[in-house]
Amino acid sequence: MSERSLNINIPVLTRVEGEGALDLSIENGKIGELRLRIFEPPRLFEKFLEGRSHMEVPDMVARICGICPVAYQMSAVQALESILGLEPGPWLTDMRRLFYCGEWIESHSLHIHLLAAPDFLGFSNAIDLAGKHPDIVRRGLRLQEAGNAIVRLLGGRSVHPVGARVGGFWRSPTKADATRLLEELKTLLPQAEALVRWTASLPLPDEKQDFESVALGKAGEYPMNHGRIISSKGLDIDIAGFEKEFSESQVPHSTALHCHHNGQDYLVGPLARMNLNHDTLPDSTHKLAEETGICFPSANLFHSIVARALELHLALTEAIRLLQNYKPADTPYQQATHRAGIGFGATEAPRGILWHRYELDETGSIVSARIVPPTSQNQARIEADLRTALNNFGLDKPEADLRQHAETIIRNYDPCISCATHFLKLKIKQT
Amino acid sequence: MKNTLPRLAVHKFSSCDGCQLAFLNAGEALLTLSRRAEIIHFSEAGWENPLAKVDIAFVEGSISTPKDLERIKAVRESANTLVTIGACATAGGLQALRNGVKQFADWVGDVYASPEYIQSLPESRPISAHVKVDLELWGCPVTGKQVLDALGDLLNGITPVNSSEPVCSECKRSGHVCVLVSKKEPCMGPVTRTGCGALCPAFGRACYGCFGPAEQANTASLAKQFEHMGLSAKDISRRFLFITSATQPFSDTGHGYLEQEDV
C-alpha cells in the first residue's frame, strides 16, 4: 500500500481569497510533482501606475486587494512620503496604526471563522458550521464588523476606503464618532479573549518544520506600519535593502512571482510576526499567549490560526488604546511640494510584509513602481510545507484525507491570491 | 423534505475579491440569507459547484483570459438570472486600462521574465461584452446594501431599483459642501453614478468616479470645466480613464484628451 501510485484530482481549492490550484502527483509512494499553481490573470498594476500622479496611487493600489486595501495604501504612502520629505507626526502615526488595526481585525476574523475554522471542526463552510455552533460564527462576524467599523471611521468604507491620502487623511473623525466606536470595541474585548482560547483548543496537528520567519521588527511595538526587516536567522536590514536580499523569480505554473531568501523559501505573516515580535505584545495579549500553552517562536504552521487570534486581540487592544485619548486634528494632512526620487515602503499586511518601491519625477508623476505582496513571498514556503507535511501525514492515507490535509495546510497561510495575482484549484495526481 | 429554496451562485473572474465581501461582510444577514436561498456555488465561502443550475448567479470580475471566456458562457447557461457586481464585471474594471495599449505585450514582458507562460486576452472586458446580463450593479466596490437589496427584490419577484442618478444629487441632499465649486477640485460627481453615499465629497475630496457614468452624463461639459480650472489635457484624461475607463462616455472623453496630450 505504501508503494501505491494514485491520481487525485481536486478541481478547485475553496475558502481562499482569489483562485489557484495545486498539482500533486504521488508516484510509487513518493511525492513527484508538487506545484502551487496560480493562474489568475495578471492585472499589471505596476504598469498602470506609470505616468499617474503620486496622489492617485492610494486609490489605485487599493484595488489590488479587496480584503487588505489598507495595507496597500499604507505601504504606498510611506514610500511616497519618504520621497517627498514628509514625516508623519504623532496624530497621523496613531491614526494609521488604528486604521491598520481595523484591517487586521476584519481580515483575521474573516479568515479564522469563514475560511479556516470549518477545516478543524469537520464542516465544508461557515454556514454549516453556524448551524451547529452559531455562537462561534456570530462572535466571528461581530469581530469582523468591528474591524470594518474602524476602517470606516477613517476611510468612509471598509473596501477601498477613500479617507487615506499621501500626507495623511482627508478628514479627521469627529470625537463623537470615535467615542461611539470606542464603547463598542470595549464590549468586544472579552469576545477576542474567548476567541484566542478557542483557537488554542482546536485539534491542531503537532507538526514542526524548519523554516525562516521574516517580518518587520525592532519597531518599538508590535509591527504594523514601520520597522526593519528581520528574520529568525539573524537578518536585520533597512527596508530599502529588500531587493538585494530577496530574489523574485517567475515559474511556469504561476502568474505570481516566487520569492526566495538565500535560495530558500521563507515565511511571512502572523506566525512569522509572532515568532519575531512576541516580546512586544501588550501585557494582556502576552498573558493570553502564555495561557495558550504555545511557546513562541513556534515551528508549527498550524499555530498560525492561534497567532492570528492573538494578533486580533492585540489589534483590538491597540485600537481601544488609540481611541481612548482621541482628539480630532486641525490639519489631518500635510501637503508637499513635488520632488523627484526613489522611495520604499514596507508594512505588515494581514498576510505579511507588503513591500513597495516607487520612483517619482520632478512633476510628481510615477516613473516606475514595484510591489511585492505577501502571498508571492509565501508561495515557495507553501510548496515546501506541503512536501514535508504530506509525507509526515502518510501518503498511503485515503485520498479524501490527503486532499483535506493539503487544503488545510494551504489555508494556514491564508493565501490571498487576489494580491499575488489570483486563482487556486487543487489537483492531486497519484500515479 | 426537498429543498425548494431559490438556488444561488457567486462566481469570480479577474478582480480583487472586494465585491464578494458584500456577502462575507454582511454579518447576521449572511446567516439569514441561508434561510432564504440555497447557496450552490461560492468558492471563497466553501461551495464548489460551478456548473450546477441556479436561479440567480452573481458575477464578480472581468473577462481577461481565453479560459474566462469559456467559463462565463457556462455560467450564463447555468443561471436563470445573471447579475454582475462591481466595476470589473460591469465595466471591465481598472485592469481595462490596458485595453488599446499598443505596448501591452511589452508590459507583460516588463513584469514577467517569461511572458510566454502568461495567457491573457488583449483586452479586459465586462461580462455584458460576452453574454446577456440581466442586472448590472455598479461600484468599486458595490455596497452590501446594493447587493442584498437587489437579491431581496429578486427573491420576491420584484425588478430591483437601480438608480443611475449622479453623485451630485445625493451629495446635495446630504448637505455636503460642493468641492467642485468651493474648493475648485476636479470632482467627477456631476457625471458619476450614485450609490456610494457621496463619500468623497463628505471627506472634502473630489469624487473619482468609482461607480461609473451616471445616465446622460455630460462628460464633455465637465471636462471643459476642468480646462477652465487649469487642468492639463493629461490630467483631464486621467480623471476619466481610471476605474471604469472602458465605459462610455468616460472612454471617449478620456481618450480625446489623451490624444490632445500626444499631439
Image (tube, rainbow, N blue to C red):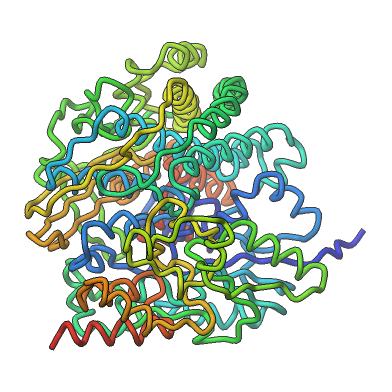
Q: Observer-nearest residue: B102 or A59?
A: A59
Which residue appears at 23% of the width and 63% of the height? A46
Q: Return the x and y of residue B151 as percentages of the image width and height.
A: 71, 65
Q: Observer-nearest residue: B92 or A91?
A: A91
Q: Is residue B93 above or below residue A163?
A: below
Query: Is A75 left or right of A283, judged from the image as shown?
Result: left
Q: Quadrant of residue A45 in the image? A: bottom left
Q: Return the x and y of residue A333 as percentages of the image width and height.
A: 29, 42
Q: Is residue B77 above or below residue B59?
A: below
Farthest front residue in view? B182
Q: Quadrant of residue B37 in the image? A: bottom right
Query: Is B156 left or right of B22, judged from the image as shown?
Result: right
Q: Return the x and y of residue A299 as percentages of the image width and height.
A: 36, 26
Q: Is residue B111 visible?
A: no
Q: Quadrant of residue A63 in the image? A: bottom left
Q: Is residue B12 visible?
A: yes
Query: How many marks do you count on the picture?
Result: 0
Q: Return the x and y of residue A202 as percentages of the image width and height.
A: 59, 27
Which residue appears at 24% of the width and 76% of the height? B116
Q: Is residue A340 above or below residue A146?
A: below
Q: Is residue A91 above or below residue B232?
A: above
Q: Observer-nearest residue: A189 or A286?
A: A189
Query: Is B121 left or right of A371, judged from the image as shown?
Result: right
The quarter of the picture where the C terminus of chain A appears is bottom left
Which residue appears at 11% of the width and 62% of the height? A363
Which residue appears at 51% of the width and 12% of the height? A291
